[in-house]
Amino acid sequence: MPPRHRSSAAPLALLYAALIAYASLSPFTGWSVPAGVQWFGFGHLPWPRYWTAFDVVSNLIGYMPLGALLFGAVVRSGGRTAVAVAAAVAGGAALSFVLESLQNYLPQRVPSSLDWVLNAGGAVLGVLPALAIHALGGLARWQAVRDRWFIDRSAGGIALLLLWPLGLLFPTPVPFGVGQVLFRLQELVAAALADTPWEAWADGWLTAQASLTPLSRANEWMLVLLGLMSPMLVAFTVVPPGWRRIVLAAGAAVLGFAATTLSTAMNFGPQHALTWLTPPTLPGLFTGLVLGVALWRLPRRVAATLGLITLTALVLRVTQAPTDPYFAESLFAWEQGRFIRFHGAAQWVGWLWPYAALAYLFGRVTAREQPPGPQPGNKPELPAGGPSP
């Protein structure tokens, strides 16, 4: 039987499936039972009258990562290759079938049998390279690298580190300032309290949030510093003290720089890709990198505690960041125009990443340290002469 490993592919597959559901059912308004459709709309997938090349490509590509992640999750958990292939393809096809069926209940969405076929085909296309990598020993090599770089039970931390750059692709009010979800929650509360005695209170709450004063240079510098230190400290909880932490700290700075530059280029054009490098940003980026390198020997539990403090400060400070006109314009471009299909994934990751990291670090702080010596499931090594009598 193949060996079992704790893999970050499993939580990433679940998260990606949730993001697909969000993109497929957004905007979640106008739910109604379709009239004249058998089985109340479930399984009713008519063939579309027309389609575009963009629809075909996007439906194929959208499910490819899901197929690859499902395959990897099953294989890494000890499943056989044939079972992993079947589970990945069936999982992608079943998810698409359910979501396409649910679109019958949304007037703004159009269910399509072509979309279902393309989504299932995308899952197959995602499985193929994953299967080839597995056949060539790629997963075994990754396990060897992971054993050298990371501690045991590090799948959650690795998943958080892989998701952090994706969250930066959604526009943030300050570079690396992820987690600004309060204003959107306030909008939802205000909408829910409309035409009630509490409507004026909700409107005043929104007005107070909208009238926040611009951040000072010191506060902007601090936000950049906290935003960069957060993934570094998450990494330090799953990597033993040593030179590898320095590499990961530098990697976080490089990935953060690249993701923020790409986001700015997508919103304002390549000629403005580096406009996010304001006077407070570069010192914050440099200070964060220096601090990350300086903490390369920090004990893991201490790193988790410091990470909790850093992320809490980041969330509290980012809620005080106002929405400037350029930020509002970039949000409008994402939500209404060019990036609508990618909007959901990056948006939710950017909003929720700090809170998921807080929960993960809290678990690291409260977890008991594993005792040294052989772990459960590992056979102790015997002396060269065999077992003693």
Image: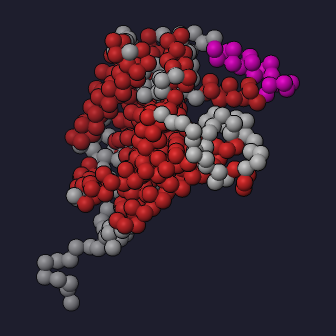
- The colour scheme used to paint the residues is secondary structure
x and y percentages locating residue 22 in the rendered image = 57, 40
Residue 142 versus residue 220 in the image, above or below: below
Does 208 lie within the magenta span?
A: yes
x and y percentages locating residue 265 in the rendered image = 37, 19
Tell me if 49 is positioned left or right of 162 in this view. right
Which quarter of the rendering shows the C terminus? bottom left
Pick the front one: 24 or 370: 24
Q: Residue at x 71, y 19 (%)?
A: 205
Main SS category, magenta section: helix
Q: Residue at x 32, y 30 (%)?
A: 255
Q: Which residues are magenta?
A: 193-210
Q: Quadrant of residue 109?
A: top right
Residue that sits furthest to the front in the current view: 49
x and y percentages locating residue 387 in the rendered image = 20, 84
Residue 88 versus residue 103 in the image, above or below: below
- Residue 74 visible in the displayed image: yes
Tell me if 1 is positioned left or right of 220 in this view. left
Which quarter of the rendering shows the N terminus? bottom left
Q: Quadrant of residue 261?
A: top left
Pick the front one: 73 or 24: 24
Q: Residue at x 53, y 12 (%)?
A: 324
Pick the front one: 10 or 383: 10
Q: Residue at x 44, y 10 (%)?
A: 217
